[in-house]
Structures are given as C-alpha cells and as structure tokens.
Amino acid sequence: MRPRAAISWSGGKDSCAALHRTHADYDVVAMVTMCDERAERSRSHGLRPDVLDAQSERLHLRRVSRGCTWPTYNVAFNDALAELARDGITHVIFGDIMFEEHRRWAEAMCAPHGMIAIEPLFGQSTTVLFEEWTGSGAEAIIVTARAQCLDASWLGRPLRRDMLAQFERLRVDPCGELGEYHTVVTNTPLFSRPLPLELGERVERSGCWALDVMVAGPEAVRHNVTS
C-alpha cells in the first residue's frame, strides 16, 4: 500500500512539480494552502479561491485551507496538519528547492503530528528543474514578478524553455527561487482537463507586480455560484 499523503499546494509550478515526482509512490488525497485572513487570496501567490478550487477539482484532491496573517501562519498551518493527521495522512509533500531552513521548517511542522515531510525537489539544479517542467507537458503562467528583476510585461507569460537565456541575462533564477516570480498552473498531465483563466488587472504593490487571474468561461459561473 502507498502511504497516504497531502501536498503543500501554492498553486504554482514547484508544488505541482513535486506532485509530478511523487504521485506514483504516494496516495495523495489532499492539498493544503494557506490564505489571507479573509480567505480571499492565497498567501504565497495571491490566487483567488475559485482558482484553487478548480485546480483541486482537476487533481481530484480535497482542498484544505486556513486563513492567517504572516505572524499567525505557523499556528494556522499546524491546525491544517492536525486535520490531515486525523484523516490518516502520514506524509506531506513540499516543493522546496533550496534553503535548508525551509526544509527544517517543514520537518518541524510535521513532526508533532507524527507526519513525515517529503522534499522531492530539494537540492536539485533549478536549471534542470525548469527544463524538466517545460518538457513535462505541464503549463504555468507568471502571476507575480519582483519589479527590480522583471517588469510587468512578464505577467501572464507561459513558461517556455527559451526563457532560460533571458533569465540568465537578467540574473533571475530559472525557478524564481529568490522570489523573482511566481506562477499559477493551468495544465498538467495530472489534471483531468486544462484550466482556462481570464487575465485581469495588473498592479504593483511593495515592489512586486501582480496579475489577477480568474477562472474563465462557463465554469466561472459554476464556481461563483457554489463558492
């Protein structure tokens, strides 16, 4: 039997890449995402709940979420893990690539619940991971960009292998591991169907460009009615 697991889900490429690498070895049944205190946006990528709902539906995963401020993030995440543990989940998959303190944090959060943190991407070359992503058949578009690294023209662009040369010229990590950009996944071989998105307003806040994205088409109406 495969161990029962959850994925720490940002909605972006790294958490999805971690799921790509582990889904055959674990029975992944849930995704956990931290949101702002009013549960209007995800904490890390600023995604709307309907986008996260559409992703979870396509992955056939139960979505577990908590609202929090940054100071209360650990308390909220701990509460979410307690819920997962009660559901018999023994492993949590994370999409960390670098920074030992991130891996230690994941392990420290999981340990009190008797859970094991799985880090399938950790320590890998970000160039190799970017090439793996763009060659996987998955799709993701850029939804945030740090203004000192990337201008607003990068918002809404799908990740493509030919971006590597541009990233190198701009001194941007290929996977955005220094916070240069974040993405939202719109398709993956693990989705039951692609996720159509409507691209909305572009704003700059605190030195970061952000793109608002919404579920597009008839499905948007269904999500708005049920949310």
Image (cartoon, grey):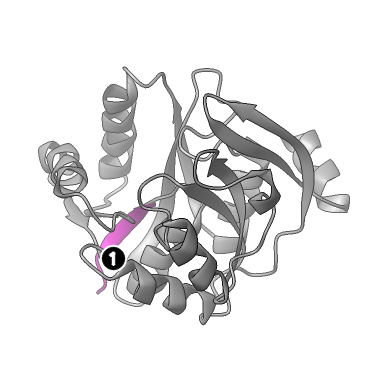
Point out residue 161 in the picture as x, y percentages from the top left corner. Answer: 54, 76
Left or right: 124 in relation to 39:
left
Residue at 18% x, 40% y is 105
- Image quadrant containing the C terminus: top right
Point out residue 7 in the picture as x, y percentages from the top left corner. Answer: 37, 54
Residue at 51% x, 48% y is 182
Instruction: Choose top left, top right, bottom left or bottom right for residue 84.
Output: top left
Left or right: 174 in relation to 91:
right
The amino acid type of the residue labelled 1 equals Leu
Q: Which residues are magenta?
A: 1-7
Q: Is residue 33 visible?
A: yes
Residue at 27% x, 50% y is 88
Residue at 80% x, 35% y is 225
Does dot 1 land on a helix, a strand or a loop?
loop
Instruction: Choose top left, top right, bottom left or bottom right for residue 78.
Output: top left
Which residue is at the front of the view, 225 or 175? Answer: 175
- Image quadrant containing the N terminus: bottom left
Left or right: 32 in relation to 50:
left
Q: Is residue 212 above or below residue 123?
A: above
Which residue is at the front of the view, 9 or 178? Answer: 178
Left or right: 141 in relation to 220:
left
Q: Residue furthest front?
A: 169
